Image (cartoon, rainbow, N blue to C red):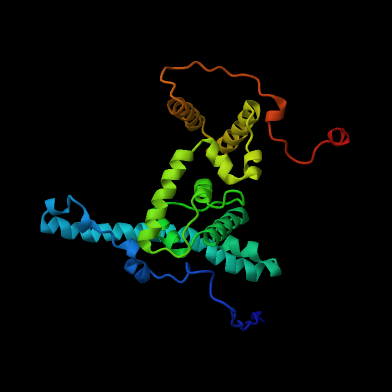
Amino acid sequence: MAYKRKERLARPLMLNEPSPEFLPGISLVELEQAPEAKPKLGEEQWWNDLSINEQMVLQVEGQGLAVALLVQGYSRLAIGAHLVKVQAILEPHSLFGRFLRLFRFTPRTAYRYIQRYNNASSHLPEAILRAAMARGIDMSGESAEMPLGKFTPAVKLLPPPADPSPDDANIWINKVIEVQKETRGGDLITAAAGPQLAQSIPQDPETLLKECYRFITTRYRKLPINGRSRSKWVHDLAGMLLAELGIGHAQTIKPIAIPDDFRAQRGRPRAEEVAA
């Protein structure tokens, strides 16, 4: 006698509130109608140098590009917004991890999306978020110290307006970008980020070297196991670093011994180390 699986009736899931904020509810039609999706090409000085046919093509392609950029920006934060809602329902049942596997998400990646969404939506008004995403500017971060990524110090120096118009949002973003460029790598960044962040950034060369070594070796291990591609990756990295640091002539680099404390320890510390 063949076994017949008993069908379970699915219970409708009632949500007390819609998905977080404005992001998941935005449709493609609404994005196409957004001010950020309508570039003002006709106001450019070179516009009248084009033929009518060229202008017509540029209008279509320009708006298509603007919508694509807006969709790309929205998708990053919308993923986090959806995950926030899913997390609230499934984590009490210890099912969030199983749900993530259906979408090829690791928990770490999912929590990063969630943190970026929470940070961006809690620190910036909707108009600024929309304008930033339409321009491909990522104003989101994964940590409490840098909730808006590399723009955090600049935003602390230049807080956003409460309810700006689309034009005012873009004006503010332009100012933030300028402040970010001026303060990049300077003392104003740590000053704007507050004493807690300033203290967390190491200054001594050995600690910085250790952090760089650990980061690079971690990324190296993620490369395909192929001697030729790994060797090229190392040479490309060294060459780009020389270019970035303004070293224009060839360098001879030899292997040196790696200090014991540079290697990240795995597992629990040994008994003698705990006792010490």
Rendering coords of residue 169 (x, y %): 40, 59
Rendering coords of residue 234 (x, y %): 50, 29
Considering every residue shown, the one lying at the far right of the view is 275
How many marks the image carries: the answer is: 0
Rendering coords of residue 166 (x, y %): 37, 62
Which quadrant would the C terminus be assigned to in this image? top right
Query: What residue appears at the point 42 percent right and 56 percent down from the top-left corner?
Result: 132
Q: Toward the viewer: 255 or 127? A: 127
Which quadrant would the N terminus be assigned to in this image? bottom right
Query: What residue appears at the point 23 percent right and 61 percent down from the top-left corner?
Result: 60
Determine if residue 134 is in view.
no
Task: Place residue 181 in its image quadrant.
Answer: top left
Query: What residue appears at the point 58 percent right and 69 percent down from the top-left corner?
Result: 85
Q: Toward the viewer: 84 or 164? A: 164
Q: Is residue 12 left or right of residue 155?
A: right
Query: What residue appears at the point 53 percent right and 72 percent down from the top-left corner?
Result: 19
Rendering coords of residue 198 (x, y %): 62, 40
User: Can you say whether 239 is above or below 117 in the image?
Assistant: above
User: Can you say whether 251 is above or below 46 in the image?
Assistant: above
Determine if residue 276 is in view.
yes
Q: Toward the viewer: 95 or 54? A: 54
